[in-house]
Every structure is written in C-alpha cells, then in structure tokens.
Image (cartoon, grey):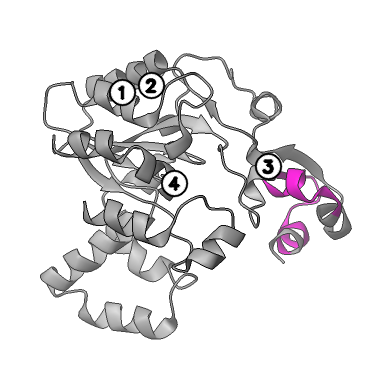
C-alpha cells in the first residue's frame, strides 16, 4: 500500500507523519501497517506546529494552501497524462488521440472541471467542516464530526479579499457545504444571498451540497441561481433507489432530487 511504499523510499533521516481521516477513523489499522506519527484531519494546531506556521494568521486561507503550480493554466494540458488512476486506459488513449479537436476538448474539460477541485485562477473559501448527517455507511463523519461553520462575516471577508486580489472565480468548499450554518443559526442560502449582492463579473461554485439540503433550500436557491452568479453545483446522488437510500439514511427520495435538478 501507499504508506509502505513511502516508508521504503523515504530517507533514513526523514520522519514520516500520516495526516488525514484514517488516523481518526481506524488508527489501529494504521498501527498495524507502520509505526509513525499521526495528525488527525482537524488537528490544525498540531499540523501548524510541525510546519512552523501561525494557524491564527489572518491571511491563512484555504486558497493559500494550494500549490501555485497546481493552479497554473498549463494544468489543463497536463491533466490528460495524469488521470490514468481514475479512468480506464482505453479512455485515456481515446482522449489523447481526439483532444486536439477543440470542441471535443472543451467538452471533456467541462466534465473534468466538474470533478476536479483544483482549478486555475479560482479563489477557494472553506466555509465549514463536518456535516449534519448520519449516513449508515459513511466513515467521514467519524473523522470530521458535526458541522462547524465559519461565521458569515469571516466568509464575506475572504470573499472580498479574493476580489481585492483580482479573482473572478470563487469556490466554496467544505465536508458538506449544504449543512453550512446549522451550528450558528443560519444556512447556505442565507450566506449566498449576501454573496450575490456584490456587484461585478464573477461566478461561484458550490461543492459537496448534500441532496437533502439542496431539496430543503430549493425555493431560496432557485431565486439565487437566477442571478447568474452560481455557475456550478456538485451533489452526491449516491443511489437511485428509494429503498437503498432509506437504508443509507440519506434523508431524501429519488423523485424529490429529480425535481430539484430539473427545477
């Protein structure tokens, strides 16, 4: 596995630290693989200590944690050779052969943009961590916990900072952005109402909006979408059968999600 390969290749003088969800979800399994230091997903203070950075810096935003190389325009031309792990080799060969066709390439890139979190010239704002659901199959909740939302004023402050730096594309990110505000007596729709009031030529992407909350906030969201400022929404459908969705404890029905998407 990846941890073992890294362990075998690392310098003897190097320390290996495993970060992310696994240390909190299944630390025993990790201990069976290797003996190493761990940092759980939300243990920002411990991570900051290792990296020797100030976690309370006013300028430490999600956008600044993304390597500038990953956001440079050439990424669109490197993608073709870097995605063999997520789609089949035959599709890779087909795209390599056909992507010079500009229409086909643009269509492919629009699909890629819908799933790839790192976009060139995009300003990222993390609005929350954790979620308000208890899906029967999900281990992420064990790691990320309940929703912890960033106050509206702080989100808007980062939004304004992106404008100041010249960004036109913004992406709101979080474990489940649909559950934003449940812990601070507000919601995603209320936040978006504030954001779309800003004048100018810009667009906002919404990532990881749980279908249950998309359906619940639909009347408010429709009005917001009509402003033309929201150009992208991702939602995890998970399944198309109501019986399975109930067993998964997803909290919505197929027909309700269909209506929301069509609406």
Image vertical order of residue 260 relative to residue 47, above or below = below
Task: Tell me if residue 22 is in the magenta stretch.
Answer: yes
Residue with the mark numbered 4:
212
Please provide percent x and percent y for residue 120. 29, 45
Q: Which residues are magenta?
A: 5-28
Q: Residue at x 87, y 50 (%)?
A: 35
- Please identify, in this view, whether the residue under mark 4 or under mark 1 is nearer the observer: 4
Q: Is residue 22 left or right of residue 169?
A: right
Q: Residue at x 39, y 52 (%)?
A: 235
Separation of residues labelled 2 and 1 (CA atoms): 6 Å
- Circle 4/circle 3 CB separation < 8 Å: no
- Please identify, in this view, whether the residue under mark 4 or under mark 3 is nearer the observer: 4
Dot 3: what SS? helix
Image vertical order of residue 168 relative to residue 210, above or below = above
Separation of residues labelled 4 and 3 (CA atoms): 21 Å
Please provide percent x and percent y for residue 247. 61, 61
On the question of residue 124 being in view, the answer is yes
Q: Is residue 36 left or right of residue 87?
A: right
- Mark 1 Cα shell of 10 Å, populated few (<14), some (14-19), many (≥20): many
Residue with the mark numbered 1:
159
Separation of residues labelled 2 and 3 (CA atoms): 24 Å
Closer to the chain start, of discs 2 and 3, is 3
- Mark 4 Cα shell of 10 Å, populated few (<14), some (14-19), many (≥20): many
Dot 2: what SS? helix
Separation of residues labelled 2 and 4 (CA atoms): 23 Å
Separation of residues labelled 1 and 3 (CA atoms): 28 Å
């Amino acid at each position: 596995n990846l941890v073992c390969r890294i362990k075998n290749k690392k310098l003897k003088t190097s320390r290996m630290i495993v970060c992310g969800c696994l240390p909190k979800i299944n630390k025993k399994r990790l201990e069976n693989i290797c003996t190493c230091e761990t940092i759980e997903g939300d243990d920002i203070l411990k991570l900051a200590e290792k990296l020797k950075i100030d976690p309370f810096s006013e300028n430490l935003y999600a956008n600044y944690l993304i390597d500038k190389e990953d956001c440079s325009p050439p990424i669109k031309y490197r993608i073709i050779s870097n995605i063999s792990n997520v789609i089949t080799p035959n599709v890779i060969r087909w795209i390599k052969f056909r992507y010079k066709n500009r229409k086909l390439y643009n269509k492919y890139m629009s699909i890629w943009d819908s799933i790839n979190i790192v976009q060139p010239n995009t300003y990222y704002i993390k609005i929350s961590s954790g979620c308000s659901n208890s899906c029967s199959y999900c281990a992420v909740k064990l790691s990320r916990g309940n929703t912890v939302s960033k106050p509206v004023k702080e989100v808007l402050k980062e939004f304004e900072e992106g404008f100041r730096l010249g960004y036109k594309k913004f992406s709101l990110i979080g474990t489940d952005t649909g559950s934003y505000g449940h812990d601070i007596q507000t919601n995603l729709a209320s936040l978006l109402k504030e954001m779309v009031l800003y004048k100018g030529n810009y667009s906002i992407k919404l990532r990881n909006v749980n279908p249950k909350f998309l359906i619940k906030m639909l009347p408010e969201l429709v009005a917001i979408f009509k402003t033309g400022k929201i150009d992208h929404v991702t939602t995890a459908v998970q399944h198309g059968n109501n019986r399975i969705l109930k067993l998964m404890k997803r909290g919505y029905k197929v027909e309700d999600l269909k209506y929301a998407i069509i609406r």
